[in-house]
């Protein structure tokens, strides 16, 4: 377990069944409830960033496989080097 400077205590509300289930996990027993929740939030934010990047990429490149109006007609002009 590691300690991070600048920690801030917050209040989070859980229903009793969910809290009981969390507290019974090996990770929570070993590292503590807060550490488990920090890891869960980091994983959530990482997944959200990946989703956002994928969504932006899809919006930019996914709908039209061509090169756009400015470069229309140039798709077949490139050449690959001979191996």
Image (cartoon, grey):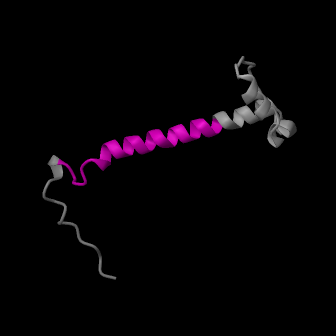
Magenta residue check for 44? yes
Residue, far left: 73
Is residue 4 in view from this perspective? no
Residue at 35% across, 46% down:
58
Residue 61: horizontal and vertical position, in percent?
31, 48
Residue 22: horizontal and vertical position, in percent?
77, 34
Q: Nearer the viewer, residue 79 or 37?
A: 37
Numbered disc total: 0
Residue 45: horizontal and vertical position, in percent?
58, 35
Q: Is residue 7 above or below residue 83?
A: above
Q: Which quadrant, please, contains the N terminus?
A: top right
Residue at 14% across, 54% down:
72
Q: Is residue 7 above or below residue 52?
A: above
**Horizontal relation, residue 71 to residue 8: left or right:** left
Residue, far top: 11
**Horizontal relation, residue 69 to residue 14: left or right:** left
Quarter of the image holding residue 77?
bottom left
Residue, far right: 30
Residue 27: horizontal and vertical position, in percent?
81, 41
Residue at 51% across, 39% down:
49
Residue at 29% across, 76% down:
81
Q: Nearer the viewer, residue 13 or 30?
A: 13
Is residue 79 in view from this perspective? yes
Residue, far front: 17
Q: Which residues are magenta?
A: 42-68
Give the overall secondary structure of the magenta segment: helix
Q: Which quadrant, please, contains the C terminus?
A: bottom left
Magenta residue check for 54? yes
**Horizontal relation, residue 82 to residue 41: left or right:** left
């Amino acid at each position: 377990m590691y300690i991070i400077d600048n920690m801030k205590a917050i209040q989070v509300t859980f229903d009793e069944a969910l809290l009981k289930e969390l507290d019974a996990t090996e990770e929570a027993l070993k590292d503590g409830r807060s550490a488990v929740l920090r890891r869960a939030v980091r994983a959530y934010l990482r997944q959200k960033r990946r989703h956002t990047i994928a969504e932006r990429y899809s919006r930019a490149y996914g709908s039209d496989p061509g090169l756009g109006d400015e470069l229309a007609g140039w798709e077949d002009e490139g050449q690959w080097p001979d191996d």
